[in-house]
Amino acid sequence: MLKKILCAVILVVMAITICGCFDEEKVITADMRGGKINERNEKLDSKSKLDPLEEQLNSMTLAEKVGQMVMIGIHGTELNDDIRFLLNEFHFGGVIFFDRNMESVEQVKKLVNDIETVANQKVPMLFALDEEGGQIARGQDFLPPAPSQESIGLDGNPDDAKYWAKYNAGLLKSIGVNINFAPVADVGSRDTRSFSDNVYVVTEFVEATVQGYEEENFLYTLKHFPGIGRSKIDPHQEVSSVDVDKNTLYSEDIPPFRKIISEHDNSRFMVMVGHLKYDAIDPMNSASLSPAVMTDLLRDEMGFSGVVITDDLEMGAIRNNVDLSTLGIRMIQAGGDIALVCHDYASQQIVYNSILMAVQRGELSESRIDESVLRILRLKSHIKSKG
């Protein structure tokens, strides 16, 4: 009998212990589950807080996005109905000025402000100049130009290149321009535009120039990738091919570009791609339409994550050989971000409309457009507000 009572007591104690363990497990499990819920909510909250640039992107219509990917030249020295129409209808994200647009410091500043006011875009516009120095300088009647790059290189002091970059930045800021289509990173151009025909000298002087622009918080453009110093024909007139092997290109033409891309913030500058053909890389396509140049070499191999802009698509080297209505599409498919169309209003509209319609019919995906526009927005995030 005593044994039976003892067994019963033991069973009761075991039952109580087991129930207690179950309750404790329930509490622990609930606490853990609650922690996971909280952790999951925190992750959802962090995902809901989009990058400001992605928020800007998401606020834009497709038409506005495509406009960011075309940069134009205009005619006249003041706002007119043609310019108003272009900005309001096509949302072009940038303007390059030439002497035809420039009479004085105050006039250019007013033109910039009027354009930006009428455009009324969600992000700043790019306003560009080719201010290389020497003969390649705009508004020389009222903007004293820097020496040519060749002249600076011949003097042999990289500090001079840095000084003149800072000078150019100040000059362009004074008229409301926020990006320079310089420096020329080509080796051996025969037109005073290169620092030298020695790749090491060019690399050193381009580096000094870039430091000058960055110290002034000014946007700049490396051109003309992957180097047009070997060109025997003016690309404004017709296309030509660079017939050297890949090792020569990599060792004698590309190093100035490679150094800046690998050592500087890629969101602070653009790379302008020229219109030459490079037989060792892509004998069929001009660089500005070549996936092998812009995607395989520039993006994948060299790691460039910034904005790629074409040289003017109305140059003879490209316009005489490719249907205008396909240029913008092919540029994007090759890896580019901005099509530069400098002179003809009809051409600008054709390039814009062809890109827009290519997205609408599925030839280009909107996600591909978003990739480019996000890079453009990242570049523009460095433009200081005028307010």
Image (cartoon, rainbow, N blue to C red):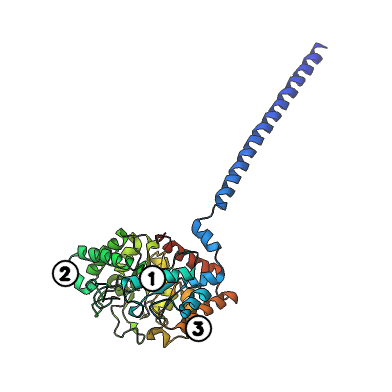
- Residue 296 visible at all: no
Q: Which mark is residue 110?
A: 1
Looking at the image, is mark 1 or mark 2 nearer the viewer?
1
Q: Is residue 103 visible?
A: yes
Secondary structure of residue under mark 2: helix
Q: Residues within 10 Å of mark 2 (few under 14, many from 20)?
A: few
Mark 3 packing: few (<14 Cα in 10 Å), some, or many (20+)?
some
Q: Determine whether the residue tagged by mark 1 lies in a helix, strand or loop.
A: helix
Image location of residue 336, percent across then percent down = 44, 72
Q: Rounded to the nearest whole Å, what is the CA distance between mark 1 and mark 3?
A: 33 Å
Report how many numbered discs are placed on residues in the image. 3
Question: Does residue 296 appear left or right of residue 235 in this picture?
Answer: right
**Tag on residue 155?**
2
The disc labelled 2 sits on which kind of residue? Answer: Asp
Read off the residue under disc 3: 325
At mark 3, the secondary structure is: helix
The amino acid type, in three-letter code, at marker 3 is Ser
Q: Could you tell which of marks 1 and 3 lies nearer the N-terminus?
A: 1
* CA distance separating discs 1 and 2: 37 Å
Which residue, as the protein is rendered here, is positioned at the far left? 155
Q: Amino acid at mark 1?
A: Lys
Q: Nearer the viewer, residue 204 or 254?
A: 204
Mark before the other along the chain sequence, 1 or 2: 1
Q: Position of residue 313 (x, y in %)?
A: 41, 81
For marks 2 and 3, give the CA distance. 46 Å
The answer to whether residue 138 is above or below residue 176 is: below
Badge 2 or badge 3: first in the primary sequence = 2
* Residue at (33% x, 79% y) in the render: 99
Task: Say which quadrant the N terminus sits in.
Answer: top right
